[in-house]
Image (spheres, helix red, strand yellow):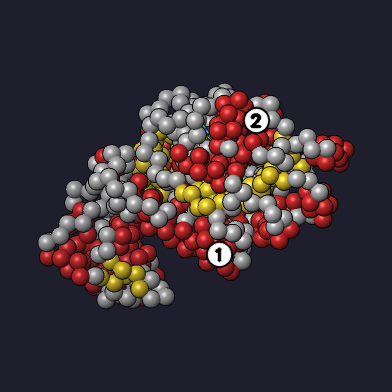
């Protein structure tokens, strides 16, 4: 039957061969064996169920979370000459009725539907009297609280196996850790599923990570390295999207904003302007991108820390889908952690705990000194064997370390020791820059010999160095207040036997900061 599927691939899509993992995924679907397929964005998940859907007798049901995604997919299939349809809340009742009639007449091969509509009594009744070839769940990580985009309506999908016991269910996602994978299998009650996991590494993406010091200058530097190429600039908050778009436009760049606060028609207009190359830069919140298939994005800039590494994989993964080199530049500030914490405050306790866990892992990632490709692969449970990826700031050696790393680390460590290892990072940083804050003077810490040892630096920079030392294992954060304590290697640094790596900040000192701002 795989021959028939390959024929269909040629006939409708004009492709001659399946990609390696696609063959296995298509075979599982043709054999009516449940499956979980994890392939990175651009890996070709859609064809894994679309090809079997046109090869097998009956109609395939595709569960998808977003109306815009459904529309795009249905349009694309219809253009290939495949009878595909959708049922969603944006359609008029007569339009829905017409689609239902086509389904009962056996004229539809693929039906796209939202989870909430699928599980209504009329839909179930209609589908029970229709011959189904398979059920495909797109964006299946939405079923898991441990995924980065949990959707309660996906939870109801656990009833599918009970309602349609003879139809195989296939789950597809771009990002899933081991835990999310197990959760998808459990939640959907998949029976002895074929689990297929592609490689997460995107060797053509060149990652770089640095603290954010001067947003506009840092963003412009990346853009200017790819003049007139398409690129995406992500911001955490809507108001940052607006200000950065204005700053870029004032500096002569062609940029448009995209976030959930803009009217639908403006969002659509801006998105299309980017897709059809009328502007080359889109400045956006994470609301932008799901379902966008623009292959020649040459850079993705994050002006803040992503809320999870799944998010980072997905957002940065929008670059270089054509396989050519693309730059993923991430700039982070310490406050990003708190901004996300604030934005996540209203989650239910369990998803919140999961989200905070992920946030901490993202925090560790941006402060780490490991190969970025290896770190990301490891997060997804995969090992990259290469000794150097030759595609990240760590392996390329483009990261700028502070020439006086040793003495700076010694100052920080001495200060922690003088504070008797009883204070958290922010307090320590304030003592080091010589802030005469009330709590510091009340504790007589302005009298310490280590007070103001780094008075020419900003608090943000010193905080960041503390994180870098923690990430390299020289400092630990202990107790409920995350007080800084020293590890054995901190002693070696004090003696000068070990030199840690500290990043060179873009803006050097407090006096320069004053001049710039
Ligand atoms: P995903 O859903 O995993 O992000 P898509 O299904 O959108 O990926 O596929 C990404 C791109 O790769 C699409 O343009 C698609 O047409 C193309 N593609 C998928 N499978 C093949 C194949 N076997 N041969 C050639 N191109 C393919």
Of 386 and 250, the residue lying toward us: 386
At horizontal 62% and vertical 39% (from top left) the residue drawn is: 52
Q: Position of residue 145 (x, y in %)?
A: 57, 61
Residue under circle 1?
352
Image position of 164 (left or right of 489): right
Q: Which mark is residue 76?
A: 2
- Residue 152, compared with residue 5, is above or below; it is below
Of 55 and 44, the residue lying toward us: 55
Per the model, the C-alpha gap separating discs 2 and 1 is: 37 Å
Q: Secondary structure at mark 2?
A: helix
Graded by Cα atoms within 10 Å as few (under 14), some (14 to 19) or many (20 or more), the crowding at tag 2 reads few
For the C terminus, the image quarter is top left
Image position of 219 (left or right of 276): left
- Residue 339, compared with residue 415, is above or below; it is above
Q: Secondary structure at mark 1?
A: helix
- Residue 245, compared with residue 443, is above or below; it is above
At horizontal 55% and vertical 58% (from top left) the residue drawn is: 192
Q: Position of residue 118 (x, y in %)?
A: 75, 51
Q: Earlier in the sequence, mark 2 or mark 1?
A: 2
Graded by Cα atoms within 10 Å as few (under 14), some (14 to 19) or many (20 or more), the crowding at tag 1 reads some
Q: Position of residue 426 (x, y in %)?
A: 37, 64
């Amino acid at each position: 039957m795989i021959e028939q599927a390959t024929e269909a691939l040629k006939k409708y899509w004009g492709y001659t061969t399946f990609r390696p993992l696609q063959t296995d995924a298509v075979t599982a679907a043709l054999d009516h064996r449940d499956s979980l397929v994890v392939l990175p964005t651009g890996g070709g998940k859609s064809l894994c169920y679309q090809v079997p859907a046109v090869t097998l007798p009956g109609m395939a049901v595709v569960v998808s979370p977003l109306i815009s995604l459904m529309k795009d997919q249905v349009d694309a299939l219809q253009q290939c000459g495949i009878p595909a349809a959708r049922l969603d809340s944006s359609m008029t009742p007569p339009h829905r009725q017409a689609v239902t009639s086509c389904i009962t007449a056996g004229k539809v091969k693929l039906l796209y539907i939202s989870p909430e509509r699928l599980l209504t009594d009329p839909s179930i009744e209609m589908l029970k009297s229709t011959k189904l070839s398979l059920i495909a769940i797109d964006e299946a990580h939405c079923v898991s609280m441990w995924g980065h985009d949990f959707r309660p309506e996906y939870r109801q999908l656990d009833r599918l196996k009970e309602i349609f016991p003879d139809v195989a269910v296939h789950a597809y996602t771009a990002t899933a850790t081991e835990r999310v994978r197990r959760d998808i299998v459990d939640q959907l009650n998949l029976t002895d599923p074929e689990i297929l996991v592609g490689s997460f590494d995107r060797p053509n993406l060149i990652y770089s990570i640095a603290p954010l010091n001067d947003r506009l200058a840092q963003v412009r530097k990346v853009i200017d390295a790819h003049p007139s190429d398409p690129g995406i600039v992500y911001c955490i908050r809507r108001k940052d999207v607006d200000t950065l778009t204005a700053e870029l436009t004032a500096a002569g760049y062609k940029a448009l904003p995209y976030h959930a606060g803009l009217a639908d028609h403006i969002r659509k207009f801006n998105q299309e302007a980017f897709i059809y190359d009328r502007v080359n830069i889109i400045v956006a919140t994470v609301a932008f991108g799901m379902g966008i298939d623009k292959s020649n994005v040459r850079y993705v800039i994050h002006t803040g820390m992503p809320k999870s590494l799944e998010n980072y994989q997905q957002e940065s993964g929008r670059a270089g889908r054509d396989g050519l080199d693309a730059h993923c530049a991430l700039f982070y500030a310490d406050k990003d952690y708190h901004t996300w914490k604030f934005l996540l405050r209203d989650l239910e306790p369990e998803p919140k705990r999961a989200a905070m866990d992920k946030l901490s892992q993202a925090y560790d990632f941006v402060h780490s000194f490991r190969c970025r490709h290896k770190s990301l692969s490891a997060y997804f449970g995969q090992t990259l064997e290469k000794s150097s990826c030759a595609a990240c700031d760590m392996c390329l050696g483009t990261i700028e370390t502070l020439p006086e790393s040793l003495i700076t680390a010694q100052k920080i460590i001495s200060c922690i020791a003088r504070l008797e290892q009883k204070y958290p990072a922010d307090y320590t940083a304030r003592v080091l820059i010589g802030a005469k804050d009330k709590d510091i003077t009340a504790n007589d810490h302005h009298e310490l010999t280590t007070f103001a040892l780094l008075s020419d630096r900003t608090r943000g920079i010193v905080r960041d160095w503390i994180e870098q030392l923690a990430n390299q294992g020289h400092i630990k954060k202990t107790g409920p207040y995350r007080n800084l304590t020293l590890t054995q290697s901190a002693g070696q640094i004090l003696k000068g036997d070990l030199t840690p790596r500290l990043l060179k900040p873009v803006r050097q000192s407090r006096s320069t900061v004053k001049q710039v701002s």
